[in-house]
Image (cartoon, coloured by chain):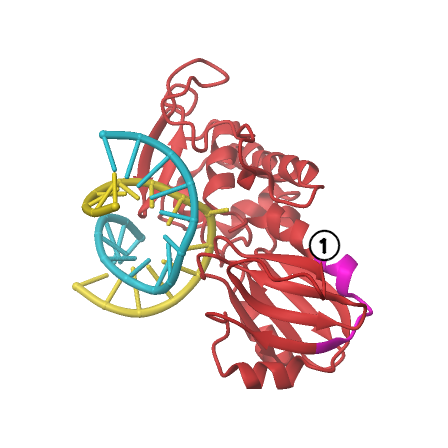
Chain colours: A red, B yellow, C cyan
DNA sequence: CCCTCTGTTGGATT
DNA sequence: CAATCCAACAGAGG
């Protein structure tokens, strides 16, 4: 999945194609990303009009005239807008037909994505479990520090905890720690106060850089043959762009962490 | 061809 | 807390 920048890109795409439109049909195809019966989801969304599209962390929220649709893209989810006549791509799991001759297809080969129709109370409950959006909170390093106060996990692991701050995933956590020159195993709650400014700035920098790149149709790091835009993520063994030391890959919480042992000393 | 490993998430289990 | 496994699939490499 897309992390925060990719979900933001998706939100803009859906906003442009759906706000003001009415949903005329909903079709669940193979392996629908729904928790309940597809008929219940269709009943809650068919005939509704789209009023707004929002994002909090990696969550996408579509506000309807009655109710809301909550979408999470998992690892491989994306939403594509097609003319109605165009055949759906493989791995299309859910199809929204709109009143402007286009469809919005939820395509997700790995099927970790989730979609649900919720009322205001359920939406609020869901969002209550998330910390503040990462792009907003990074503008305020002391507030960032407060969110991680007392955290006795490694900083790399704590950054992925969506209840502290929402939107950071495995890629941008590694990139931000490199930019801030922080060792991934530093205990989050033990970071010196002075570290929160560069870490906040690093997060904002790496996520904003991706947002700038992703003005096209597809997510940049998924494009075939594209050169990796990342400094450490996925670059095990390659020379550090800053000092030339070979980038190391290790595992934290069953997830790869990439980092430079010289630039990010313990 | 087959087998193994890895992958952008998040949740459950031990 | 932590480590580990799992969901379901695709792609890379041996």
* Drawn side of residue A251 relative to residue A58, left or right: left
Query: Where is the C terminus of chain A found, in terms of image quarters?
Result: top left
The quadrant holding residue A58 is bottom right
Tag 1 residue? A13
Q: Nearer the viewer, residue A43 or A83?
A: A83
Residue drawn at point x = 53 percent, y = 30 percent: A228
Question: For residue A156: magenta?
Answer: no
Looking at this view, name the residue that lies furthest to the top.
A244
Above or below: residue A9 compared with residue A260 = below
Above or below: residue A26 compared with residue A76 = below
Q: Nearer the viewer, residue A154 or A27?
A: A27
Question: For residue A17: magenta?
Answer: yes
Subunit bearing disc 1: A
Boundaries of the magenta span = A12-24
Residue drawn at point x = 45 percent, y = 61 percent: A112
Above or below: residue A103 compared with residue A139 = below
Residue drawn at point x = 47 percent, y = 57 percent: A109
* Drawn side of residue A23 relative to residue A142, left or right: right
The quadrant holding residue A196 is top right
Residue drawn at point x = 40 percent, y = 24 percent: A260
Residue A8 can be seen in this image: yes
The quadrant holding residue A10 is bottom right
């Amino acid at each position: 999945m897309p992390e925060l920048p990719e979900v933001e890109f998706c939100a803009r795409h859906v906003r442009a194609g759906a706000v003001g439109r009415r949903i005329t049909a909903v079709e669940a195809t193979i392996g629908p990303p729904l928790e309940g019966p597809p008929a219940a989801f269709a009943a809650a969304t068919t005939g509704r009009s789209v009023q707004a599209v929002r994002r909090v962390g990696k969550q996408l929220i579509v506000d309807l005239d009655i109710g809301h649709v909550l979408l999470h893209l998992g690892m491989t989810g994306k939403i594509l807008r097609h003319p109605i006549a165009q055949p759906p791509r493989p791995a299309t799991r859910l199809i929204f037909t709109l009143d402007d001759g286009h469809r919005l297809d939820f395509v997700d080969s790995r099927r970790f994505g989730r979609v649900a129709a919720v009322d205001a109370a359920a939406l609020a409950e869901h969002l209550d479990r998330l910390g503040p959006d990462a792009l907003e909170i990074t503008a305020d390093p002391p507030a960032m520090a407060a969110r991680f106060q007392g955290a006795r996990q490694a900083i790399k692991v704590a950054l992925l905890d969506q209840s502290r701050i929402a939107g950071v995933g495995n890629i941008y956590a590694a990139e931000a720690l490199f930019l801030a020159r922080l060792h991934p195993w530093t205990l989050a709650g033990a970071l010196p106060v002075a570290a929160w400014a560069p870490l906040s700035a690093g997060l904002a920098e790496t996520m904003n850089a991706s947002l700038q790149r992703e003005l096209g149709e597809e997510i940049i790091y998924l494009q075939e043959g594209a050169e990796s835009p990342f400094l450490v993520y996925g670059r095990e063994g390659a020379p550090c762009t800053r000092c030339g030391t070979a980038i190391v890959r290790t595992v934290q919480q069953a997830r790869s962490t990439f980092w430079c042992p010289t630039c990010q000393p313990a």
